[in-house]
Image: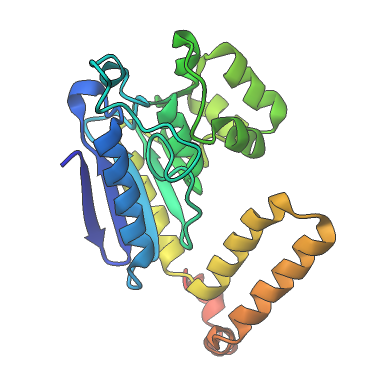
Amino acid sequence: MAVHYEIDDAVAVVTIDRPEVANAVDRPTAEELADAFRRFDAEESLSVAVLTGANGTFCAGADLKAMQEPEAPRASRVSPDGDGPVGPTRMLLTKPVIAAVEGHAVAGGLELAAWCDLRVAAEDAVFGVYCRRWGIPLMDGGTIRLARLLGHSHALDLILTGRGVHGEEAQRMGLANRLVGPGQSLAGAMELAHEVASKPQAAMRSDRLSSYEQWSLPLDAALKREYEHGMATLQTGELFSGLDRYSSGEWRSGSRAG
């Protein structure tokens, strides 16, 4: 298996493990990734997923060697329908995913990282549209998510030049939400994942969904949709346990679950 799926309490860890090609994604790997995230989204006991790569590299994008094989049977699937070429990039899950980035997150690997809700990156990790060098377009949401995450100017800086960015520049752009020391991205992402998992989940998921849905809606429709999500969340009763914790003074202790 090129993709490993492990569970740590309420957190699923999805790891790309193809060291011979810097964790590049061919068609079977893309299918495994998509299946792994469908599994995560369906498992009620899980709250957050972490996506990472084995052997000190996040993902080098689509497997270019697979594209060169006769009839390219393992090349990433390119179709207007179904999953994205590198797997889950057309999915909107109901729960958050955090990328733990070591080494290179480039081309389709950058698109996978941008698909995640948050990115914890090693200071020496490198993000870049390296496919620019080979005449390969972004087809896993990169032109859309980079502009939304970074603003159009920063996104075009990456898209037009294909240059790599890391460390403080990646964080300043918005590519990295958290910076950690080399080799510490998975530990940092797991800590953040458990923190998010400790929060009341219904309201968090409702707010997360509203933040994604608003992109395609005019303001009045987006506000109405936020209200509808909020009312549905209130009906879960989650609010009452939160009010009890507040009344007890738990919030003064800095409890993560407050």
Q: Position of residue 103 (x, y in %)?
A: 34, 26
Extreme residue in the right direction:
220
Q: Residue at x 42, y 49 (%)?
A: 98
Give the quadrant of residue 25: top left
* Count of number-bearing discs: 0
Pick whichever, 174 or 255, lies toward us: 174
Extreme residue in the left direction:
1
Vertical position of residue 236 compared to residue 173: above or below = below
Question: Does residue 77 appear in the picture of this structure?
Answer: yes
Q: Residue at x 54, y 32 (%)?
A: 142
Q: How is the image coloured?
A: rainbow
Q: Residue at x 35, y 54 (%)?
A: 37
Q: Position of residue 225 (x, y in %)?
A: 72, 68
Vertical position of residue 202 compared to residue 69: above or below = below
Question: Does residue 190 appear in the picture of this structure?
Answer: no
Extreme residue in the front direction:
71
Q: Position of residue 129 (x, y in %)?
A: 50, 20
Vertical position of residue 203 compared to residue 25: above or below = below
Q: Residue at x 43, y 52 (%)?
A: 97
In the drawing, does residue 88 fall left or right of residue 247? left
Q: Position of residue 24 (x, y in %)?
A: 30, 27
In the drawing, does residue 241 fall left or right of residue 28? right
Quadrant position of the N terminus in the picture: top left
Vertical position of residue 199 compared to residue 89: above or below = below
